[in-house]
Each structure stands twice: as C-alpha cells, then as structure tokens.
Amino acid sequence: MRRTVAIAALLAFSISSPARADDAPSVYERVYLTLPQALRIALPAGDPVEPFTLLPSAEEHHAIERRLGRRVPEDRFTVHVSRHDGRPSGYALVMDEQGKYYPITFIVGLKPDGHVREVAVMVYRERRGDAVQRRRFLDQFLDKSADDPLMVNRDLVHLTGATVSSWSIAAGVKKATVLFDALIRSREEVRP
C-alpha cells in the first residue's frame, strides 16, 4: 500500500513539475539585422533593389531536392535583385534553416555569377550557438558556389559550441546557391 502511494505521489510530482530548460527551451530571440540592414550588407551599395518571387515547377522542385539530397518544404522563394544600368548587380535570399530547436534567419548575398558575396545572420532564436554570426565562421562561405560542397567537415569548419547551427547555416547557403543555379540563372531574362 505504501509503495502504491509513493509511486502515485512520485507520478503526480513529475506530471506537475515544470520541464527542465534543456527539454523544452524557450525562444530567446536576438535580432541582429532587419531586412533593410541585411540587404545593404548582402547587395552592392547604391543599386536599387526589388523583390520578385520564384515559383518552381514540380519538376524543378524535385530537381532541387535531388541536388541538395534533402527535402525542401518551401514552394516559393523571394529573391531581392539589385540592378546597375539595368543589369543585375547581385541577388539576395533570406533563408530560414532549422537550428537545434528553432529556425535561424540569415541572408545570402550572391554575385551575378552565383558566387556567394556575403552571408549575415539576421535573427538567432536560441540561447547557445549564436557564434555562427561571427565573421570568422561566415567568411568561409565567400566566393563559394553551387559547385562547392558547402559542407561542414568538407570545405567548412564548424564552431565549437555551435555545431548544429554551423550545419544549418551551411545547408541554407548551399540551398541559396543551388536555387540560383537551378532557377535564377535560367531565368535571367525575367525581370521583377
């Protein structure tokens, strides 16, 4: 009888006690850049910027997923293009990639040839791992393209204490370069 009461008390305590922070972390959002600030970093200064939406066909979407080797849940992508004398001077895509618990929002700036011009973290939502916003990590992506592996432990070095975030940023940059290669390059004649 005592044993049953002790088990019931223990069960009641475990159900009513709050979850540990490690089990159910709360969002700890840090905004490093707004969209206008991020666009100024990702694209050439002084050129006018306009957004346009890419809607890949089902065939294009599957080809992108095959190339990335993973599922791509988005069915549309907003691209910001800057123009100089009517010609594209750069492209920028805002990416959301899953971190350990919450998405990391960052911008990938691309040169007109599809090579990475800049990467900058806009919003980080967890208490740990935000070191990925440091230049020491982000500068590894500069001048890379869809032809590069863009993988941690291949051509990128992760940050200790931010391993999952490092993989997430790498996956998002790879996705941005593949989207450029698969969709933007082939639609150069399409103007926003």
Image (tube, helix red, strand yellow):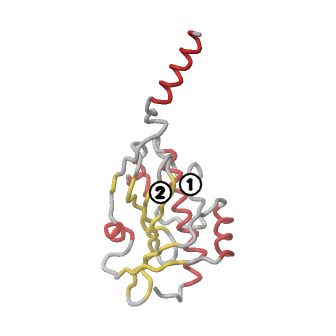
Alpha carbon distance from label 1 to label 2: 8 Å
Return the residue found at the far front. 1
Q: Amino acid at mark 2?
A: Gln
Residue 190, how many percent across, how many down?
Answer: 52, 87
Residue that appears at 47% across and 50% down = 102
Return the residue found at the far top. 2
44 up-or-down from 191: above or below: above
Quadrant hosting residue 171: bottom right
Which of the numbered marks, if any, corresponds to residue 114? none
The mark total stands at 2
Q: Amino acid at mark 1?
A: Asp
Q: Is residue 47 rendered to the left or right of residue 114?
A: left
Residue that appears at 41% across and 46% down = 126
Which of the numbered marks, if any, corresponds to residue 155? 1
Residue that appears at 38% across and 85% down = 84
Choose between 100 and 157: the one closer to the eye: 100
Quarter of the image for the N terminus: give it: top right
Residue that appears at 44% across and 87% down = 87
Residue 156, how many percent across, how many down?
Answer: 53, 53
Residue 66, how many percent across, how many down?
Answer: 69, 65
Choose between 7 and 30: the one closer to the eye: 7
Q: Residues within 10 Å of mark 2 (few under 14, many from 20)?
A: some
Residue 107, how many percent across, how many down?
Answer: 43, 64
Q: Residues within 10 Å of mark 1 (few under 14, many from 20)?
A: few
Secondary structure under tag 1 reads: loop
Residue that carries the numbered disc 2 in the rendered image? 140
Quadrant hosting residue 86: bottom left
Q: Earlier in the sequence, mark 1 or mark 2?
A: 2
34 up-or-down from 28: above or below: below
Do callouts 1 and 2 mark residues in contact (Cβ within 8 Å)? yes
